[in-house]
Amino acid sequence: MSVNKIEGILPCPQARVALVVSRFNSFICERLLEGALDTLKREGQVPEEQITVIHVPGAIEIPLTCQKACESKNYDAVIALGCVIRGSTYHFEVVANECAKGLSQVNLKYGIPVTNGVLTTDNLDQAVQRAGSKMGNKGSEAAASALEMINVIAQL
């Protein structure tokens, strides 16, 4: 018996990709952006002229911007990058939850891969570890997921 198998691969030189990056906690977000760009160019073989970087004030603005990027039909995938670090108030939960919920809604509504590279951490050390230190670079991982999903959807 032969089973049909669909898998994504990373090289995706035809991809048009938008990266929506929060300026809040920019010292972390810029490291996430560097990781994502490196993965898109090196592993994905995406030419620079097919990559657009969009900066927004914070994580709560990311979903709307991703939605507008999807509506434009100019992109095959959108990568969300940001960093929300827990504070002493409920604000962390609101921002983190609404950002994740908004990204999921955009993903499903437009059928375009919208990958979530928004860190939600308890402290600055955890953010640093996930932005290119001990825990890898979550921006790079979000870019790899976007490329793989472009290729999976193309096969469907």
Image (cartoon, rainbow, N blue to C red):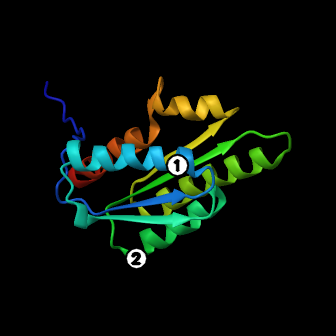
Q: Residue at x 86, y 44 (%)?
A: 89
Q: Secondary structure at mark 2?
A: helix
Residue 127 drawn at (x, y percent): 59, 35
Query: What residue sits right under mark 2 in the picture?
Result: 72
State which quarter of the image contains the N terminus.
Answer: top left
Nearer the observer, 129 or 27: 27
Q: Is residue 125 left or right of residue 8?
A: right
Say which mark, if any, is on residue 49.
Answer: none
Q: Are marks 2 and 1 in contact (CB under 8 Å)?
A: no
Expressed as whole percent of the image width and height from the top left, the position of residue 20 reads: 48, 60
Q: Residues within 10 Å of mark 1 (few under 14, many from 20)?
A: many
Q: Secondary structure at mark 1?
A: helix
Residue 136, given in percent of the width and then of the height, sits at 43, 29
Gap between marks 2 and 1, in whole Å?
24 Å
The kind of residue tagged 1 is Cys
| Left or right of residue 51: residue 97 | right
Residue where numbered disc 1 is placed: 29
